[in-house]
Image (cartoon, grey):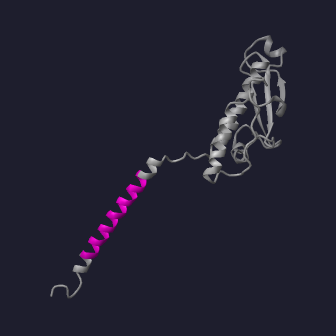
Amino acid sequence: MSSSTPAVPLPPRFRDLTTPDDMHAARAWIDEFRRCQIPKADVELSFARSSGPGGQNVNKLNTKATVRCPLDVKWMPEWAKAALRKNPAYAASSASLLVSSDVTRSQSQNLDESLRKLHGIILAASQQDLKNETPQEVADRVKAYARTQDVRRRADKNRRSSVKGSRKKGSFD
């Protein structure tokens, strides 16, 4: 991790995003997390021989990078863990996310790509249950529409009531 990238922020400690305050705190954490990189010390790194085209380079060098990140690291948000467990990168046997890359012929580039993929998976899972805040003007418009509908509904009910009342016996006197 370079000195220019900030450390991974600790997420707020709640399991679900239920209140607007929870959503606001989660958004703040996501904004901080977006700017940082996952530290290599918090993940398990392994390298293997890559597959596919590449000639002797593929057969001789361990360029494929695999990153394993346990879900119980301190900076993993609780509200995202359910979504992460459903992700194809989740390995149930070790309760961790397993991401690999063998796109390039360079071990360091594949490692960076794996860490980028892991970062994207965690970011997507943490944003999954976030609900956008409704702007005040939209909320006011919806309230006005509901009031208008209520007035129309009451007028229709009164009209129907008077029609039915005019059909009763003895109203022709």
Q: Quadrant of the N terminus?
A: top right
- The residue shown at (81%, 29%) is 40
The answer to whether 105 is drawn above or below residue 124 in the figure is above
Q: Is residue 68 left or right of residue 119?
A: right
**Which residue is nearer to you in this view: 83 or 60?**
83
**Which residue is nearer to you in this view: 151 or 66?**
151
Spot occupied by residue 170 in the image (x, y as percentages of width and height): 20, 88
Spot occupied by residue 75 in the image (x, y as percentages of width and height): 77, 40
The answer to whether 1 is drawn above or below residue 25 in the figure is above
Main secondary structure type of the part rendered in magenta? helix
Residue 51 located within the stretch drawn in magenta? no
Number of marks present in the image shown: 0
The magenta region covers 141-162
Spot occupied by residue 110 in the image (x, y as percentages of width and height): 75, 22
- The residue shown at (71%, 32%) is 119
- Residue 171: quarter of image: bottom left
Task: Give the residue furthest to the top.
Answer: 56
Task: Give the residue furthest to the left.
Answer: 173
- The residue shown at (82%, 43%) is 93
Q: Is residue 92 left or right of residue 152?
A: right
- Residue 148: quarter of image: bottom left
The answer to whether 171 is drawn above or below residue 29 in the figure is below
The answer to whether 129 is drawn above or below residue 110 in the figure is below
Spot occupied by residue 87 in the image (x, y as percentages of width and height): 69, 41
**Which residue is nearer to you in this view: 3 or 126?**
3
Residue 152 located within the stretch drawn in magenta? yes
- The residue shown at (38%, 60%) is 147
Q: Quadrant of the C terminus?
A: bottom left
